[in-house]
Image: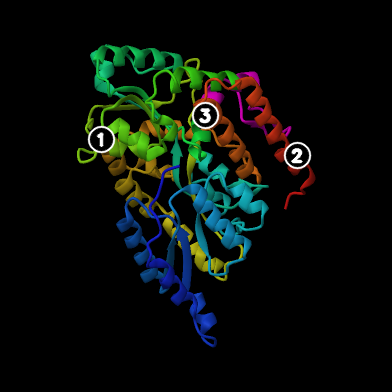
C-alpha cells in the first residue's frame, strides 16, 4: 500500500478545539461539523479545494484528521477510535481489505439506505464487491488499484524483445538485458517485498498466477501450504529475489521500489497504476517517455492477475450526523471530484462513465488498458479475521524469501496450521 505522510503537529489541537463545544448550543453546533479521518494526499490542494466546496454548498465545517503514514498504522488508529465508539468520527477512508472486519465488528454503518442498486451500478464491480459483506454495502469506492508491470520499453526494443507474458520469460529477459548492458547498477526486477501488507499483494499475484490461493474461504482452511502456492513461493525466492532483483528489494515498499525504477536501475517493476504518472514525469524520472506498462505475467500466457487495491469512503456507525456524512461521501465520490483527483494524482477512478471521458482519456491514455486490468483484479478474501491472517502470511513470506536455507515445505505447513487456528474462530463466531 502506498505510504502517506505523517500527521501535521498542528492538527490535534485544532481537532480538540472544534469538538470541545460548550453545553447548550452543542448539539446544534455538532450537527454543523463533520469529522473526517484520512491520510495526507499526494495532491493535498485538490482535496482542500473539494472539501472547501462541500463546506460552501452545505453550510458546514469539515474537520480533518490526517492519519499516520502506513496503512497498518492507519488501520490501528481507526480501530481504536471505533472500538471506543468515538462520536467525533463521522467519515473515514477504508482500505478495500477492511470492510468485512469493520462490518463484522459493528463499526461501519451499512449504506444500503443511501446507496441503492442503481447508484451502485455506476461503479466498477470489483471495488464495489470489495465493499460488500453479509449482503450489505459498507463503503463507496473512491480509488481503484491493481498490480501492473512496468518495463523499460527502450531496453526491450534495443534487444528486440517483446514484453513478457510469463514470469519465466521475464526472468530470461532480465538476465539477457542486464548481462548485455554491463551496468553494475542495473537490476532485473524491483517490487515490494518488505514485511507489510504490500508483500501479501505481491506474493498473492504469483500464487494465483500459478493456480494456488491464500486460503479456501468456503472451507475455512489454509491453502498457502498447497503445492501450487509453495511452488510459486519457491519461484519468487529462487528466481526473483535471489536471481534478478535488486539486493535491497526485501526492504522495499512502493516508494523505494519505484525510486529504483525511475532512476533507471531496474528493467522491470511491479507497482500500482499511480506509478505511471511518476515514471513519465520529467521532473521525477530519468526514464520518462521510455516506459511501458502491461498486465502482470502469469506462469502460462494469460494466467496473470493483479491484486485488487484501493480505498473506500465509509461512515462510522457511531456518527451523530449520518445524513450529512452521506452527503460528504456522495460528493467526494462523485464524477467531478474523481476526475480532479485522477488528473492531479494519476489515481484511477471507480466510476464507469469516467472511462469514456474524452479529456481523461486524452491526458491519461493508459486508462483504456487499465480498465481491463481492474475488471480482472483479484480481491483478497473478505473475512473479519483478515488482519491476523495477513500477519501470519507476512511473517511466513518474509522469512522464506530472506533465507533460502529455510525448509520451505516445513515453513509453509507451519504457516498453514497457524492460519487454520485463526480460521477456526469463524466457525464459532456467529456473523453479525
Residue contact between numbered discs 1 and 3, judged by CB atoms under 8 Å: no
108 is higher (above) or lower (below) than 63: above
Label 1 sits on a secondary structure element that is loop
Tag 3 or tag 1, which sits nearer the N-term? Answer: 3
How crowded is the residue under tag 1: few (<14 C-alpha within 10 Å), some, or many (20+)? some
Magenta stretch contains residue 215: yes
Quadrant (top left, top right, bottom left, bottom right) of the N terminus: top left
Q: Which residue is drawn at 70% across and 40% down?
A: 422
Q: Would residue 307 be visible to someone looking at this image?
A: no
- In the image, taking residue 239 as reference, residue 430 lies left or right, namely right
Residue at which label 1 appears: 280
Q: Give the range drawn in magenta.
A: 206-229
Mark 3 vs mark 2, CA separation in Å: 24 Å
Q: Residue at x 51, y 40 (%)?
A: 197
**Residue 335 in the image, given as x and y percentages of width and height:** 39, 51
The one nearer the camera, 148 or 287, is: 287
185 is higher (above) or lower (below) than 116: above
The one nearer the camera, 349 or 244, is: 244
Label 2 sits on a secondary structure element that is helix
Residue at which label 3 appears: 203
Residue farthest to the bottom, as pictured: 24
Mark 1 vs mark 3, CA separation in Å: 27 Å
Amino acid at each position: 500500500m502506498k505510504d502517506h505522510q505523517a500527521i501535521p503537529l498542528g492538527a490535534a489541537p485544532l481537532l480538540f478545539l472544534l469538538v470541545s463545544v460548550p453545553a447548550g448550543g452543542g448539539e446544534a453546533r455538532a450537527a454543523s461539523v463533520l469529522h473526517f479521518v484520512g491520510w495526507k494526499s499526494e495532491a493535498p490542494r485538490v482535496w482542500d479545494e473539494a472539501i472547501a466546496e462541500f463546506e460552501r454548498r452545505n453550510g458546514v465545517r469539515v474537520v480533518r484528521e490526517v492519519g499516520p503514514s502506513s496503512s497498518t498504522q492507519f488501520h490501528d488508529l481507526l480501530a481504536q477510535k471505533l472500538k471506543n465508539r468515538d462520536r467525533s468520527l463521522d467519515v473515514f477512508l477504508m482500505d478495500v481489505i477492511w470492510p468485512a472486519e469493520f462490518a463484522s465488528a459493528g463499526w461501519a454503518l451499512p449504506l444500503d439506505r443511501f446507496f441503492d442498486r442503481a447508484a451502485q451500478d455506476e461503479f466498477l464491480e470489483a471495488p464495489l464487491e470489495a465493499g460488500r459483506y453479509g449482503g450489505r454495502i459498507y463503503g463507496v469506492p473512491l480509488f481503484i488499484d491493481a498490480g501492473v508491470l512496468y518495463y523499460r520499453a527502450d531496453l526491450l526494443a534495443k534487444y528486440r524483445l517483446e514484453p513478457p507474458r510469463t514470469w519465466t520469460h521475464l526472468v530470461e529477459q532480465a538476465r539477457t538485458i542486464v548481462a548485455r548492458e554491463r551496468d553494475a547498477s542495473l537490476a532485473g526486477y524491483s517490487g515490494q517485498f518488505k514485511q507489510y501488507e504490500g508483500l501479501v499483494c505481491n506474493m498473492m499475484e504469483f500464487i494465483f498466477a500459478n493456480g494456488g490461493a491464500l486460503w479456501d474461504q468456503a472451507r475455512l482452511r489454509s491453502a498457502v501450504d498447497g503445492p501450487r502456492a509453495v511452488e510459486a513461493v519457491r519461484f519468487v525466492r529462487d528466481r526473483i529475489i535471489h536471481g534478478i532483483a535488486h539486493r535491497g528489494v526485501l526492504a522495499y515498499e512502493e516508494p523505494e521500489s519505484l525510486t529504483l525504477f525511475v532512476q533507471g536501475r531496474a528493467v522491470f517493476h511491479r507497482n500500482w497504476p499511480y506509478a505511471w504518472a511518476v515514471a513519465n514525469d520529467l521532473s521525477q524520472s530519468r526514464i520518462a517517455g521510455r516506459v511501458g506498462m502491461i498486465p502482470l505475467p502469469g506462469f502460462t500466457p494469460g494466467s496473470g492477475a493483479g491484486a485488487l487495491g484501493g480505498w473506500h469512503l465509509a461512515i462510522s456507525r457511531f456518527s451523530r450526523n449520518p445524513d450529512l456524512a452521506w452527503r460528504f461521501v456522495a460528493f467526494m465520490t462523485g464524477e467531478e471530484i474523481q476526475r480532479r483527483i485522477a488528473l492531479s494524482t494519476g489515481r484511477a477512478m471507480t466510476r464507469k462513465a469516467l472511462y469514456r471521458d474524452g479529456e481523461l482519456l486524452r491526458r491519461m491514455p493508459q486508462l483504456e488498458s487499465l480498465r481491463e486490468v481492474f475488471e480482472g483484479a483479484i480481491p483478497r478474501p473478505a473475512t473479519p479475521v483478515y488482519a491476523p491472517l495477513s500477519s501470519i502470511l507476512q511473517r511466513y513470506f518474509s522469512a522464506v524469501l530472506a533465507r533460502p536455507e529455510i525448509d520451505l515445505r516445513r515453513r509453509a505447513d507451519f504457516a498453514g496450521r497457524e492460519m487454520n487456528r485463526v480460521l477456526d474462530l469463524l466457525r464459532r463466531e456467529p456473523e453479525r
